[in-house]
Every structure is written in structure tokens, then in C-alpha cells.
Amino acid sequence: MYTYRDLSGTVVAITGATAGIGRELARQLVEEGARVALGGRREERLQELVAELGADNAVGVVMDVRSPADNQRLVDAAVEKWGRLDSVVPNAGIGMYGGILDHTDEQLAEMMDTNYAGTVFTVRAALPGLLADGDGGDIVIVASVAGFRGGAEEAVYAGTKHAQVGLAGALDRELREKGIRVTLICPAGTMTEFAVGAGRTDDDPRAAEWLVPADVAAAIVTTLKQPRSMRTAIWTLWSMGQGS
Ligand SMILES: NC(=O)c1ccc[n+]([C@@H]2O[C@H](COP(=O)([O-])OP(=O)(O)OC[C@H]3O[C@@H](n4cnc5c(N)ncnc54)[C@H](OP(=O)(O)O)[C@@H]3O)[C@@H](O)[C@H]2O)c1
């Protein structure tokens, strides 16, 4: 029988935990016995989620991933509360849909700063904690299938996701020998606020075919539970109705 790791008592920091994939991930991890430090800008959402999960299992930090200091506060909150950090999931992200002539310079900067620089800042803040106890750790970056092949009307977003893919590959080569596993989780369209906002609507005919947040969260949980003797570098996820 294959033996998965027991996540009980492990500590995971998640950015973008106020909605969608991050919120569902927090729920699934707490069901597995893990403790979660949750980051996002919407304080009320964080408070609701911490109340749902229990203050022994979850801590919320109002933070913006574009700020290195905010990322540090998220990590510090986990270490102060539970004395350790085992895994980090840079998940926060935004997407705006439209053709290459449609986006403003400000929108380009916002997507790049959030999706790419935000991921770098989260990893930088977490790495010392992941290395601290010498028993390895996980960095699980939520990118997208758009990180390999962007679709029409999402060129700028796809570029930010390609940047995350490049970052993760290089980080894997930099950190593997230090016991850090770096995994890219790359979902196709997933039914979240993100997917139906900023240029798409929930009557999009493709919506019926999308993944749901629980599908993506379960892939992340499975990745964390894999024995430390192996690693998943890239996991692309599609629903059966989505063409790859
Ligand atoms: N949904 C899809 O179709 C899909 C497909 C492939 C990949 N993804 C990726 O999956 C990840 C999660 O997206 P989702 O679909 O779950 O979207 P979502 O439901 O809109 O959630 C996005 C999360 O990111 C947070 N966030 C955004 N900007 C932030 C900032 N500057 N600082 C801190 N937190 C910020 C949001 O929190 P606040 O607003 O409270 O800050 C929210 O918790 C993203 O990286 C996205 O690119 C999504």
C-alpha cells in the first residue's frame, strides 16, 4: 500500500485565501489536520474563514502580495502562532481579459506585480522558515495552463503565468538539493470569482465545463501529501469537458 504523508500539525501559508481556490484549499487542509495562515486584502472574508475553521487552526492576515513587508507579516504570523512553517502556496492572482490593445499600462503593471512579483515576494518571505528546521518544505505555486499556452484575449495574463512557470522551474533547480520541493499547479478554467469577473460572465457558455475550486485544492493537498522522496514538478488540471 502506498503511504501518503500525514499533514496533521503541519503549517501552511496561503495567499489569496479569501476566495476561490485558496479558500477551498484552506478548508481541505484543515480537514487534513494542518494549520493555515491565510492572506488576502479583504479583512471581513478572512475573519469569516478563520471563524469557520477555528482560531486554533487558522490565522488571517490582511495583506497585499505586492508588498514584501506584507508577505513577511503573513509568514511571521504563522511562525509566531505555531513555531514553524512547512509549506507555502503562492496562489493570489488576478486576471483581466481582453485583446492586446485593450489593456492600460496600469492594468499590465497590476497583473505583473500581483501574479509575478507577488509570487517572488511570497517565496522570499517563506523560504527562511521552510529551511529553518532542516526537514524540507514545499512551495506550491498556483499558475495556470495559460503559463504554457495562452488563449486568445488573455495575452497579458498569459505572460504573467509564463513568468511563474519560469520562476518555478528555476527555483526547483536551485532548491531541490536543500530539500525544498517546488510544484506548479496549473489549472484550466475554474469556476471562481476570478473566472467570471474582469471581462467574463457566469453565463459564459464555457462555464458549465469548468473545474471547480475543490478540484484544484485537492491536487495541492495531494501534492503536499506525497512522500518526501519524490516530487511533482508540474500538474496541469482540466475537466473532462475542456479541450487541452
Ligand atoms: N479561476 C480560473 O479559471 C483559474 C485558472 C487557472 C489559474 N488560476 C489561478 O488561480 C489563482 C487563484 O485564483 P481564483 O480562481 O481562486 O480567483 P479568486 O476566486 O478571484 O481568488 C483570488 C484570490 O487572490 C487574492 N488576491 C488578488 N490580488 C491580491 C493582492 N494584491 N494581494 C493579496 N491577495 C490578492 C484575492 O483576495 P483579495 O481580493 O481579498 O485580496 C483572492 O483571495 C490565481 O493565481 C489564478 O491566476 C485561476
Image (cartoon, grey):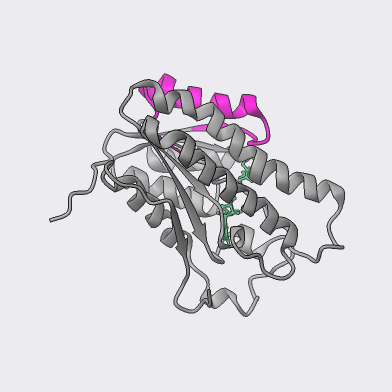
Q: Please indicate, yes or no, whether residue 184 appears anywhere in the rendered image.
A: yes
Closer to us: 48 or 6: 6
Q: Is residue 65 magenta?
A: yes
Q: Residue at x 63, y 36 (%)?
A: 65
Image x and y of residue 232, in percent = 38, 51
Image x and y of residue 198, in percent = 73, 60
In the displayed structure, 199 sits above or below 105; it is: below
Number of marks drawn? 0
Q: Is residue 133 left or right of residue 187?
A: left
Closer to us: 17 or 66: 66
In the displayed structure, 132 sits above or below 191; it is: above
Identity of the residue furthest to the left in this view: 1
Image x and y of residue 128, in percent = 47, 23
Q: Residue at x 50, y 42 (%)?
A: 48
Give the magenta range: 60-88
In the displayed structure, 66 sits above or below 165; it is: above
Image x and y of residue 100, in percent = 82, 63
Closer to us: 233 or 202: 233
Closer to us: 7 or 156: 156
In what quadrant of the picture does the N terminus appear? bottom left
